[in-house]
Image (spheres, rainbow, N blue to C red):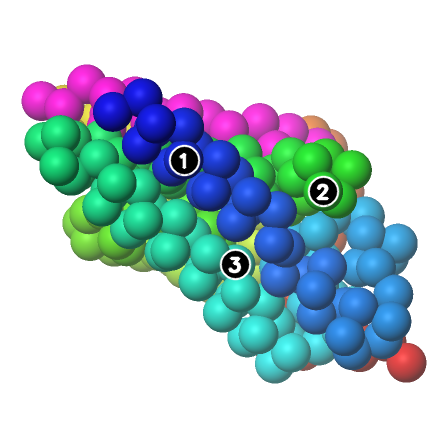
Amino acid sequence: MAYAIVIAVLASYLLGNLNGAVCMSTLLSHEDVREHGSGNAGLTNFARNYGGWNSLLVVLIDGGKAVIATMLSGLLLKPYGLEAEGMMLGAVAVSLGHDFPALLGFRGGKGILSGFLCAVVMDWRVALLVVSLFALTYVLSGYVSLGSIMGAGSYAVGFVIWHHSQPWVMAGGIFIGVLALFMHRSNISRLIHGTESKTNLFKGRKRK
């Protein structure tokens, strides 16, 4: 089982290093999205700098890697009766790979999209809770960051509510939610001080 765990962790972490925003900014403009805007390799910064509709490709890459990592890890540990735990292990590893990618100088995204797609695979109820709070908060406030923060908090709460009988799964869900909140610490500070920028995800400015 140890070999299966090691393979699951390494494969998921390396998949996390495949950053959609970095890949697409390189393909579209031969530059690094982290050189612009907030300097973050995430969906929001990409949309602001390269256009909202181009962001759909970022969603496919970051979402796809999360789904693959979660399902692959679940399959690797399924023979040991630990499919759910394996899926969460993959989700944690791919989130860490996305946020702290060794192949990209440990400068990644903030993990909201990849974490959400992991939840879609593991438990639709958690995913529905997250996307509902994100969408409601974003529509009412115009702040993607505030929606992401609410989504991250509900992520942890959702796994506590629906997976309290599976300690490792619950712990992993809490970890991913708290990690996302940690990655948004600068946004939280700007929101508190009233200096955070609003974002239209579908009308981002395209760079030449």
Q: Main secondary structure of the magenta part?
A: helix
Please tell me whether mark 3 or mark 1 is closer to you in this view.
Answer: 1
Q: Residue at x 9, y 31 (%)?
A: 81
Whether residue 161 is visible here, answered yes or no, is no
Q: Which residue is mark 1?
A: 7
Q: Residue at x 57, y 59 (%)?
A: 142
Q: Rounded to the nearest whole Å, what is the CA distance between mark 3 and mark 2?
A: 16 Å
Please tell me whether mark 2 or mark 1 is closer to you in this view.
Answer: 1
Please tell me whether mark 3 or mark 2 is closer to you in this view.
Answer: 2
Q: Nearer the viewer, residue 33 or 145?
A: 33
Hey, what amino acid is under mark 1? Ile
Q: Position of residue 145 (x, y in %)?
A: 58, 47
Hey, what amino acid is under mark 2? Leu
Counting labels gives 3
Q: Which residue is mark 2?
A: 103
Q: Position of residue 190 (x, y in %)?
A: 72, 36
The answer to the question of whether label 3 and label 1 lie on touching residues, with beta carbons closer than 8 A, is no
Instruction: Classify mark 1: helix, strand or loop.
Output: helix
Is-magenta flag for residue 94? no
Q: Which residue is mark 3?
A: 62
Which residues lie in the magenta part?
Answer: 165-188
The answer to the question of whether label 3 and label 2 lie on touching residues, with beta carbons closer than 8 A, is no
Return the disc, 3 or 1, that comes first in the chain's sequence. 1
Q: Rounded to the nearest whole Å, what is the CA distance between mark 2 and mark 1?
A: 18 Å
Hey, what amino acid is under mark 3? Asp
Quarter of image, res 166: top left
Q: Nearer the viewer, residue 6 or 111?
A: 6
User: Please, which residue is most extreme toward the front here?
Assistant: 3
Q: Position of residue 136 (x, y in %)?
A: 39, 57
